[in-house]
Image (cartoon, rainbow, N blue to C red):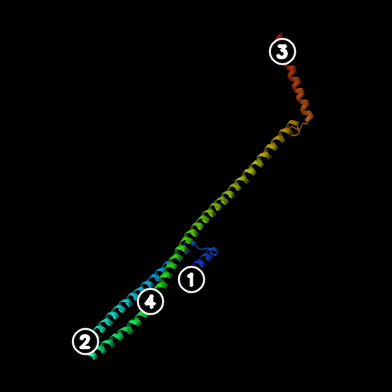
Amino acid sequence: MSFLKRATEIFEGKINKLLNAAEDPNESLDLSYEKMLAGLQETRQHLADVVTEQKMLEQQIASAQAQAARHENDAKMALAANREDLARAALTDKQAEMTKIASLTQAHDNIVAQVTKLTQYEQTFQDRIEQFRTQKEVIKSQYGSAQAQVKVNESLTGLGNKLGGVGETIRRAEDKAAQMQARAQAVDTLAATGVLDDGDGRTRSERELDKLRTTDAVDAELARLKDQAKK
């Protein structure tokens, strides 16, 4: 399994976990991002190692080519001196260098292919990380907004509960006030009609007659006083 695929699975797993578990999504997303950055750094280090190997092979090929050229010159010089034996030995050494060059070139071609592949992989990985970073920030922003909304809703719910209690208290007070007013009106009505007993044991008729007697006595006494004043 490639590291990029693994990182993608980690990301998808984290998102699913965010939806199903009570964990901090910001922390989880940041952790996944850090792991992907670590993976990218590892890829770059591997790429650097392979490029270093490529350069070393190129240096070895250049050195072998220089040796092959030197042996060929030695062979030419030996033939010019009528030393075919030395010329043959020089060409044998050149052939050994050519064999070495062929082997080194094959290894170099393989390394170049690896470098190309790793370079493409590193670029793809970097692009994927950038996409993840963008998604991460979007998700963190959405999560923060959702958190704020939840807090607002919770606050409104708490306020509603508190106001609901106040409203119930007001309703009870209004009911009691209405009952008290109705009772006061009833008492006034009963008192006016004489239904209520004031405790003197008289009936309503007796109280009214006594009231008339009192009024007549007062009137008579008033008239008497007026007559005396005239005399």
Q: Amino acid at mark 3?
A: Lys
Q: Residues within 10 Å of mark 3 (few under 14, many from 20)?
A: few
Q: Earlier in the sequence, mark 2 or mark 1?
A: 1
Q: Amino acid at mark 4?
A: Ile
x then y, percent, for residue 160: 59, 49
Q: Secondary structure at mark 2?
A: helix
Mark-to-mark CA distance, 1 and 4: 24 Å
What is the x, y in percent for residue 97? Answer: 30, 84
The reply, left or right, for residue 149 in relation to residue 197 is: left
Q: The residue tagged with tag 1: helix, strand or loop? A: helix
From mark 2 to mark 4, how far is it between C-alphas? 42 Å
Q: Which mark is residue 5?
A: 1
Q: Is residue 172 above or below residue 57?
A: above
Label 2 crowd bin: few (<14), some (14–19), many (20+), radius 10 Å: few
Q: Which residue is mark 2?
A: 80
Q: Which residue is mark 4?
A: 111
